[in-house]
Image (spheres, rainbow, N blue to C red):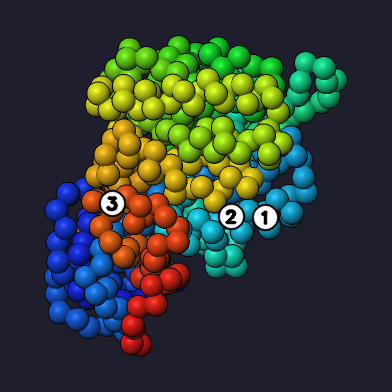
């Protein structure tokens, strides 16, 4: 569903420039027709001098990450997981995230429900379950378990070049936006060290080759410098987390045109609230290690010229902190670069030049704020501050109670 809309008296942040432009935004059939024209249209919204910016893009989201217990998330009835996931995407949209990239979860049915407006939520790009080697980050079994595990809603164990090619081809057959692999250990997985690279060069190359031939790409969960370099050297172009990388790894990312998707808020929230939500002690210990180094990794990436997007990676009840990561990122990059991370840079990562900006012919996914986030990031981050969310030309959430006429 696309709509017609006119937003008058707006101060426009276009997703890239530090300069706000006064004007009127004309939306026709869900896309921006003109900026700066006269007021007209089926519905007119007077922004009253408020800031209009692109809708936010969360490039590391988990609709199916409904608890901090990965094993439960993988094996609970899918109907239950999807119903809870529907509440998560609805809440994300109301915060201002008009696009999310679900890396490690999602499926065709959930995407159809969003596309057909059976449920309310952002534009939804999914990878399906993340691919993990046996004993890798996506393998939830402890060393004390004798249990067959091939996969679940968020993770799938696939070993070997031939099997990986088959699974990747089927993933694209069923509508995946990209492919997610586990290329190092992780915080909540029980037996894999954080630093060790996962998947062989041949295996990663096979996944990257299949993705490239479909015009897509591979996103890799990777923490250590060695894992990051191993991933990008073999065709990965989206590094998730990257907390333990060094300057050489950052330079390797820049040389290959790769994008970093940091997820600082996940570690900060787990540090503060993980114990009360049942995060195991081993995971709490790993989390302390990656939280301490995450900010430095962003600095290294910035200094090397790596494109930096925005991701939240929040599981269970931590989802309510989705906006707070923008403040953490702004402490390192500043407000402008952080806003770009969550708009235009994110759009570049997902290959959607029509998203993440306020310009002619762009999709009219917009966010109206009661203040200027370039000066005060809390205007955006504080979920209690007024906001209006526009998706494809339709006002889908309005806490500002703006005056409008049909």
Q: Nearer the viewer, mark 3 or mark 2?
A: 3
Image point (35%, 46%), residue name: 342
Q: What secondary structure is marked by label 3? A: loop
Q: Nearer the viewer, mark 1 or mark 3?
A: 3
Residue 153 placement, left or right of 328: right
Which residue is under mark 2? 88
User: Which numbered circle lies on residue 162?
Assistant: none
Q: Is residue 347 visible?
A: no
- Report the front residue among 376 and 50: 376
Q: CA distance from mark 3 to mark 2?
A: 27 Å
Which residue is under mark 3? 376
Q: What secondary structure is marked by label 2? A: helix
Residue 355 location, x and y as percent?
33, 54
Which quadrant holds the N terminus?
Answer: bottom left
Residue 327 in the image: above or below residue 116: above
Residue lying farthest to the right in this orientation: 146
User: Which numbered circle lies on residue 84?
Assistant: 1
- Report the front residue among 183 and 316: 316
Image point (74%, 55%), residue name: 79
Q: Looking at the image, is mark 3 or mark 2 earlier in the sequence? A: 2
Residue 247 location, x and y as percent?
32, 14
Q: CA distance from mark 1 to mark 2?
A: 7 Å
Dot 3 and dot 2 residues touching (CB under 8 Å): no
Residue 76 placement, left or right of 100: right
- Report the front residue among 31 and 17: 17
Image point (23%, 51%), residue name: 375
- Sort mark 2 into few (<14), some (14-19) or many (20+) by Cα contacts within 10 Å: many
Q: Looking at the image, is mark 1 or mark 3 earlier in the sequence? A: 1
- Sort mark 1 into few (<14), some (14-19) or many (20+) by Cα contacts within 10 Å: some
Residue 138 location, x and y as percent?
64, 28
Dot 1 and dot 2 residues touching (CB under 8 Å): yes
Residue 81 placement, left or right of 319: right
């Amino acid at each position: 569903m696309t709509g017609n809309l006119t937003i008058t008296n707006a101060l426009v942040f276009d997703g890239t420039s530090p300069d706000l432009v006064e004007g009127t935004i004309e939306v026709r059939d869900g896309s921006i027709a003109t900026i700066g024209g006269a007021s007209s249209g089926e519905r007119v919204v007077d922004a009253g001098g408020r800031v209009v910016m692109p809708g936010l893009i969360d490039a590391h989201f988990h609709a199916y990450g409904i608890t901090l217990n990965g094993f439960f998330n993988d094996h609970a009835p899918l109907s239950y997981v999807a119903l809870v996931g529907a509440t998560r995407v609805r809440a994300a949209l109301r915060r201002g995230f008009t696009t999310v990239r679900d890396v490690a979860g999602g499926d065709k049915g959930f995407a159809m429900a969003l596309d057909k407006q059976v449920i309310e939520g952002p534009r939804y790009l999914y990878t399906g379950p993340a691919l993990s080697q046996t004993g890798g980050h996506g393998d939830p079994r402890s060393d004390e378990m004798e249990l067959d595990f091939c996969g679940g809603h968020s993770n799938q164990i696939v070993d070997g070049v031939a099997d990986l090619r088959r699974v990747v081809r089927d993933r694209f057959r069923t509508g995946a936006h990209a492919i997610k692999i586990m290329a190092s250990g992780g915080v909540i997985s029980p037996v894999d060290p954080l630093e060790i690279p996962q998947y062989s060069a041949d295996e990663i190359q096979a996944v990257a080759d299949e993705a490239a031939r479909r015009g897509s790409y591979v996103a890799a969960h990777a923490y250590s410098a060695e894992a990051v370099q191993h991933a990008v050297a073999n065709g990965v172009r989206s590094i998730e987390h990257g907390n333990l990388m060094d300057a050489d790894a950052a330079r390797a990312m820049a040389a290959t045109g790769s994008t970093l998707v940091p997820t600082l808020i996940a570690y900060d929230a787990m540090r503060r609230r993980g114990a009360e939500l049942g995060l195991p002690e081993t995971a709490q210990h790993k989390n302390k290690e990656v939280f301490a180094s995450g900010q430095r990794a962003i600095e290294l990436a910035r200094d090397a010229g790596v494109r930096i997007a925005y991701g939240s990676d929040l599981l269970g009840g931590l989802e309510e902190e989705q906006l707070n990561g923008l403040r953490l990122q702004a402490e390192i990059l500043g407000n402008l670069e952080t806003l770009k991370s969550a708009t235009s840079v994110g759009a570049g990562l997902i290959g959607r030049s029509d998203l993440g900006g306020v310009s002619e012919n762009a999709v009219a996914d917009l966010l109206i704020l009661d203040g200027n986030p370039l000066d005060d990031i809390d205007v955006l981050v504080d979920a209690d501050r007024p906001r209006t969310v526009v998706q494809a030309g339709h006002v889908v959430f309005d806490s500002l109670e703006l005056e409008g006429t049909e």
